[in-house]
Amino acid sequence: MTAHEPLPPMAPIGLLVELTHRCPLGCPYCSNPLALERPAAELDGETWKRVFSEAAALGALHVHLSGGEPTARRDIVELTGAASRSGLYTNLITSGIGVGEKLTNELADAGLDHAQLSFQGADKVTNDRLGHYPGSWEKKRAFAAHVVKAGLPLTINAVIHRANLDQVGAFIELAVELGARRLEVAHTQYYGWALANRAALMPPRKQVEESIALVEAARARLKGELVIDMVIPDYYARYPKPCAGGWGRIAINVSPAGKALPCHAAETIPGLEFWNVRDHSLADIWRSNPAFRAFRGTGWMREPCRSCDRREIDWGGCRCQALALAGDARNADPACMKSADHARIVATAMAESESGEEALRWRSYKQKVEA
Ligand code: SF4
Ligand code: FES
């Protein structure tokens, strides 16, 4: 087989906008960059509204309003309304902190289609510790009730790692109790803050396998009541996931300061210049920004990806992980068993999972490490 040239640009399916990096929580696995964007650098509302209409005109179907905590933006209702009027399906990805009944109803009235609420633990002690925010448990539960009362579909998002892996069953019960339609059991992906905290977060392989079996049993038991999606920790997988759906294929992320990125960690790859939505239209960025074209398609691939029959299934996995763990973004993602680096990263993961390391670096604008 011959490797393909970059695909002719199709429409992106989705837009993920990090409206702000401000967040009341301090989750140690946050996918935001370690260098968080300051509030003064954030795009203004008018620019975000233009970005939403450009995304819709380009063919995008949905927008994830994310952060940080997106409701930290005072204009969140206005922005939600603008995204909805542009014709995009709107999903709010939130911690639920600071979102009372009044704001929830205003968001619903503005056209919000769906809310995705994070829980850090399935009980108060674990949740409040891992979110680094005392009292967040009650606020999250209250927000879930507001969402259900407003008639919006609710997804609970649970990021799983060594400190809460024993709670997968309890997360499932929590999602049912709160009236969620969907639960995302997402094993931590090791970028950003999670990579910095990997030794304290990496779960043992055996327990991961048990949690997968538990989810599969619950899926059968709760069919028609709760959809459970699961993201498996890719260090223990045989093949990588198609990160971001493939570089520059279906998704655009926009940072709080307006940088358009093919994935949330793209800025870790040196030598790429990411255009800003302040200076370029989204269509221009999607079609012409060399950074979006750099790993689009399969033409950039080396062996073993170049001749692999999965190359248009997982698109070589994650470029950022290939750089971080295998030294070059053009290498196969070492989560792949065909990668020359696979055995080494699995051995590292297994050693870290038994390291007993517990010190966590909480996500913060300040640099601090606390146990
Ligand atoms: Fe995917 Fe490359 Fe591994 Fe094939 S060799 S499965 S394309 S990462
Ligand atoms: Fe960048 Fe996976 S996070 S390609």
Image (tube, helix red, strand yellow):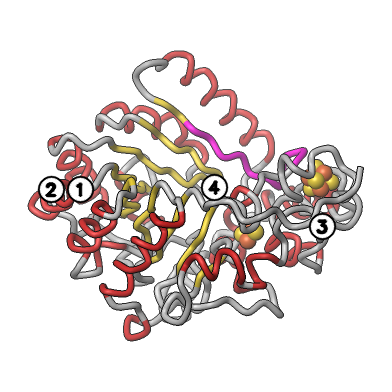
Identify residue for label 2.
109
Badge 1 amino acid: Gly
Q: Which residue position holds label 4?
A: 161
Q: Secondary structure at mark 1?
A: loop
Q: Where is residue 98 shown, x and y percent of the image?
A: 19, 60
214 lies left or right of 299: left
- Looking at the rendered structure, the kind of residue marked 3 is Gly
* SS state under label 2: helix
Q: CA distance from mark 1 to mark 2?
A: 5 Å
Mark 2 or mark 4, which is nearer to you?
Answer: 2
* Disc on the earlier residue, 1 or 3: 1
Residue at left offset 61%, top offset 39%: 232
**Mark 1 sits on what residue?**
111
Q: Quadrant of ligand 2?
A: bottom right
Magenta stretch bounds: 229-239
Q: Is residue 55 above or below residue 336?
A: below
* Residue 125 visible in the current orientation: no
Q: Residues within 10 Å of mark 2 (few under 14, many from 20)?
A: some
Q: Is residue 165 shown to the viewer in this render? A: yes
Residue underneath mark 3: 299
Report the Cα–Cα distance between label 2 and label 4. 36 Å
Question: Mark 2: is the Cβ under 8 angstroms from ligand 2?
Answer: no
Q: Give whichever of discs 4 and 1 has the lower sequence position.
A: 1
Q: Residue at x 20, y 46 (%)?
A: 143
